[in-house]
Every structure is written in C-alpha cells, then in structure tokens.
C-alpha cells in the first residue's frame, strides 16, 4: 500500500513538472479580459468614443464653456460627507505609500469645488477669477458598484458646470445644452425626456410639516431610494433613526412625490404658489420660449442621491423604459461651504456617462458607421520608396492622412487592393515615368462611379502643386473648378451645388452662401450632407478658412468632424 502511494506521488510530481514545462513553453498565462467593470478600447471602440466626445465638446463650445481637468487620484476626504450616500461605499480608496488617504475619483464635482476654492481669497470669499465660470470636462470616474447595461465600474463622464449664477437661467442653459447634444446624435424628444424637480419645493414641504432643516439632506437621500425599494420601505426609513419623522408626515411626503404635475404636487404638499414653485414654473416657461420644452416634464420623485444638491434637480430618462437614468444634475449652492468657503457660491451642473449614451444610440438605431479611413495610400514603384515617402510627407503637410504601402511593386493592383482594405479615398502612385516629368498619379476611389471615364477619376498632379490636388478633380455634384493651368477660383466665390433648402438654382457667390449659412447650419438645411463635404474640401485646398462670419463658422464646424464622418454624409 505504501509503495502504491509513493508511486502515485511520483506520478503526480511528473505530471506537475510536465504541465509546468508546457506552460513555460507557451509563455505566462494571463487574463485576457480586463478587470470586472472596465473596458478595453480597440480602434473601432475608440472611433465611437471620439465621436461621442466630439459631440460633447462641440456642444460645450456652442454654449461658451471652457474645458478643464483634474487628477483621477483625489483626496478621500472630498467624498466623505456623512449623509448616507452610496458613493462613499463605492470608492476605490486606499492609503498610499506616504500614508495619505486617497481614492480614484467616483465623480468630478468635488474636484471642481476644490479647484474653484483655490481661486477664492480665503479671508473674504472673493473670487480671483471673473464669474460666472462655465467649465466642462470629460473625466474618467470609478465606482465599485453592480455592473449592468449602461453602467460600469469605470466610465467617462461629460460634466458641464456653471459657477456664479444664482438664478434659474443657469439650469435652463444646462438643460438646453443636454437637448442640443441629443439632437446632434439623432436622439429626439420622443426618445428621451428629462424629469425636473426642485429640492427647494421639497424643503418647503418639510418645513410646513415641522421637519427641522438639519434633517433635510438625510431625508432627500432616503426619498431618492423610492425607485429601488418602494414607498413602504422609504416610509420605514423616514420614521426610523436618525431622521425620526412622524409616520403621518413621512407618508404625506412620499404621497406627494407621486404627483404627475407641478400643480398636483403643490396641492398635495400644501405649499401653494410658493417662491419655490414659481421658480420651477419659470424654468418650464423659459424652456418653452427657447424651444426645448417638449423634452421636459415635472416629476416630484426625482431627488438625486447626492447630498450636496440644494435646488432644481433633473434626470434624463429613456421614454421606452429600457435603459437606466441617462444623465442627471442640479443646483448645489452649498457644496463649497462644506469644504471651507466662508460664503455660499451658487453652482449648477450635470454629469452624463459614456456607457449609457452608447447603449442609447444602439437602442434607437442611430449609431453611426465609423470605419477606419485614410485620405491617401501612397504606392511606390520598384526602387521609388524614397520618392513615395517624400510625396507622403507633402500630402501630410497639406493636412491629409496618409498610409504608405510597405511594398515597392510593379503590380499596381496590389496597392489598390491595400487602399481598398484600409478605406483610402485616393491612391497616389509614384512611378519613374511620371516622376521624371515632375508628376504624381492620383486616383480617386470613392467620389466617382465605377463606369466614369478614367480621365475623370485619375489625374497626373504636378509635384509642386500636390497641396491643391482637389482642384484637379471635378467632384460629382460640385461646381466646376478652374483648369489647373488657370488661376484657381476661391471656394468662397465659387458656385455651390443646388440644394433642397437653398434657392433652386443654388447660390451664385459668397453673399448667397453667407445668407444661407446665417439662417441654417449646413448648406442643405439642418443636416450635414455631401454638399458640405465637397465645398469644404475645395475651400481647404484653395483659399482655406474664409473671413466672413457665417462661412467661417461653418468652415470651422465642418472641419471639426473626422474625415470618415464627412465621407458618410449623403
């Protein structure tokens, strides 16, 4: 028996050693998936991320906001507010090697508050910066929470905040920006709505019910759990320690939050036409006046879970009910005083996660096609690689993205095959015959029909004029260009293609274009189209950015899109 056991041990050891040898031969074994709740961003994912970020940045620019950032590693104390917030239990916090308690930031607003406080004179509370501050950021945030669709432990979040405006106009501007972003990515008010409430109104209810102000924050945090645990459990929490409300008061408050209109809530809560109710009415009126009132609805149950909110709060939601809260924010006038400000500073802002907007675009089937694309592939004939690299450099100097085919070849079809694989718009073929004449052959692969004549799609471009290659091609539907031997007309004075929203014969000069773009954002109306791309390419190749106001605004806006986005326009 002992011999049998010893024999088995020897066999086990041999098996372990054999497995170790196999492992060593294969290399170290690692987890190929990222840690739970986090993501890898492959190039296709990055194109989608950049698309969303680009829309966020453009929206912020349209509203006059400046971008800022802060370290992803923050002081833990910024988030310890002792108000029963879930966020304090979800932090990735630890003590660093110098003994400091730090955390990966779970949200950006406290970092913003810290930065704003650094601009304040401690003795007087006066700001060294000119108010209002209108700042935005796209920070990476970390929360150890349950993963679900549209919510991960690591995410990026679009934040827009206004510091220094105490009136409801700040909230209206932020809500307007959210709606503008939605429209820019193809989301309508039939797809998404924004629920609006005010903690000031709830505060009036609590005061009328005899609830002391010091219990206001804790009460809000509990009421925010209505959707998660239900009305009965919320009442139990409100009557228990530390809040300790009377049951009748707790039930009245919870019942009031079921109101569907502001009038109904005011009646149920017994606050009538208080100043807080009037402020909310003004918000809805201003939204109607501006033209985005159809996105908003009153919802008394929206409280928001963060303790620092003091006034209007809002939350974007999927009208189909498939996705969780899409975005949220509100007013937080007292946050800076929690961190040592000698006086209150009015603040208002929102956060908007990237995970949920990506899911929303998929759900509503408005996710854009964002293939990898390059403007040029340069192909070298045998022994012409140095010349090909020179051509690539000149094209890059002209602002074109260029990929150089790594093989020198006599077989042109190899280069074309590679260009097709990487979605190149044009191929530049560098061959000795043309090179000796100071020419480079360029073929357009995307802007013409297959049966168009070769001489229309392919041109020999003078090497010294490569930057103006676009002027040698007559793009379909584009106005005629001057011949390469003649002076090239500037795009601002060239005729533009006829468009549905423009005069039937199309504009005949810069004044016509200026008039069209003064009234609408794009040549063809309110949606970017191929006509915008074509004129932009001509302007970029010819005279560059125009000086007139509307044309210049349009030119810079079109230039903010990637080449692949512009090529997707119909």
Image: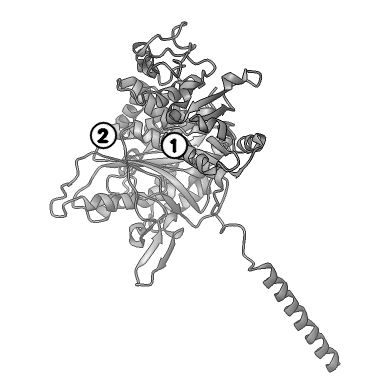
Q: Which residue is mark 1?
A: 394
Left or right? Give the position of 36 relative to 168. right
Residue at 41 percent of width and 16 percent of height = 486
In the displayed structure, would residue 337 be above or below residue 57? below
Closest to the observer: 534 or 267?
534
Closest to the observer: 301 or 425?
425
Q: Secondary structure at mark 1?
A: helix
- Can residue 137 be seen here? The reply is yes
Q: CB of mark 2 within 8 Å of CB of mark 1?
A: no
- What whole-number distance in Å separates the C-alpha atoms at marks 2 and 1? 54 Å
Horizontal and vertical percent position of residue 421? 63, 38
Closest to the observer: 286 or 408?
408
Residue at 46 percent of width and 6 percent of height = 505
Q: Secondary structure at mark 2?
A: loop
Closest to the observer: 171 or 220?
171
* Circle 1 residues within 10 Å: few <14, some 14–19, many ≥20: some
Q: Which residue is mark 2?
A: 167
- Can residue 48 be seen here? The reply is no
């Amino acid at each position: 028996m002992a011999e049998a056991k010893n024999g088995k041990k020897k066999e086990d050891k041999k098996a372990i050693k054999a497995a170790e040898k196999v492992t060593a031969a294969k290399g170290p074994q690692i987890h190929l998936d990222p840690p739970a709740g986090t993501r890898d961003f492959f190039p296709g994912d990055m194109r989608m991320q950049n698309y969303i970020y680009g829309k966020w940045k453009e929206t912020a620019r349209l509203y006059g906001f400046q971008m800022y950032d802060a370290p992803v590693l923050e002081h833990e104390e910024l988030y310890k507010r002792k108000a029963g917030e879930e966020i304090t239990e979800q932090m990735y916090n630890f003590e660093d090697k110098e003994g400091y308690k730090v955390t990966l930031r779970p949200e950006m607003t406290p970092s913003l508050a810290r930065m704003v406080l650094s601009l304040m004179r401690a003795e007087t509370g006066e700001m060294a910066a000119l108010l209002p501050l209108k700042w935005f950021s796209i920070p990476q945030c970390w929360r150890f929470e349950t993963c679900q669709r549209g919510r991960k432990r690591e995410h990026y979040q679009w934040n827009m905040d206004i510091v220094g405006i105490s009136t409801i106009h700040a909230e209206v501007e932020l809500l307007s920006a959210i709606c503008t972003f939605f429209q820019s990515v193809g989301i309508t008010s039939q797809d998404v709505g924004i629920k609006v409430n005010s903690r000031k109104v709830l505060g009036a209810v609590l005061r009328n019910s005899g609830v002391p102000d010091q219990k206001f924050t804790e009460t809000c945090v509990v009421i925010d759990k209505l959707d998660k645990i239900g009305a009965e459990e919320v009442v139990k929490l409100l009557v228990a320690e530390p809040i300790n409300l009377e049951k009748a008061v707790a039930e009245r408050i919870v019942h009031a939050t079921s109101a569907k209109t502001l009038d109904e809530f005011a009646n149920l809560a017994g606050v009538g036409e208080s100043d807080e109710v009037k402020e909310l009415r003004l918000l809805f009126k201003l939204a109607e006046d501006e033209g985005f009132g159809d996105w908003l609805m009153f919802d008394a149950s929206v409280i928001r879970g963060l303790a620092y909110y003091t006034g209007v709060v809002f939350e974007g939601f999927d009208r189909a009910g498939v996705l969780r809260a899409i975005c949220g924010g509100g007013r937080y006038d007292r946050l800076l005083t929690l961190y040592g400000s000698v006086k209150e500073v009015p603040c208002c802002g929102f956060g908007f996660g990237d995970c949920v907007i990506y899911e929303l675009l998929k759900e509503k089937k408005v996710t854009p096609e964002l293939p990898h694309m390059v403007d040029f592939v340069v192909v070298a004939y045998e022994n012409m690689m140095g010349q090909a690299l020179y051509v690539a450099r000149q094209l890059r100097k002209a602002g074109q993205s260029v990929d150089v085919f790594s093989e020198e070849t006599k077989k042109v079809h190899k280069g074309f095959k590679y260009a097709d694989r990487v979605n190149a718009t044009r191929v530049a073929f560098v061959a000795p015959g043309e090179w000796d004449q100071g020419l480079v052959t360029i073929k357009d692969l995307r802007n013409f029909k297959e049966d168009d004549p070769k001489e229309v799609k392919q041109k020999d471009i003078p090497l010294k004029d490569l930057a103006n290659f676009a002027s040698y091609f007559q793009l379909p539907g584009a106005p005629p260009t001057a011949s390469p031997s003649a002076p090239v007309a500037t795009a601002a004075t060239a005729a533009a293609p006829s468009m549905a929203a423009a005069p039937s014969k199309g504009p005949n000069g810069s004044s016509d274009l200026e008039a069209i773009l003064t009234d609408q954002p794009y040549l063809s109306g309110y949606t970017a189209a191929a006509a915008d791309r074509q004129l932009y390419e001509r302007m970029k190749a010819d005279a560059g950015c125009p000086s007139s106001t509307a044309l210049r605004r349009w030119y810079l806006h079109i230039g903010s899109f990637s080449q692949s986005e512009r090529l997707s326009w119909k």
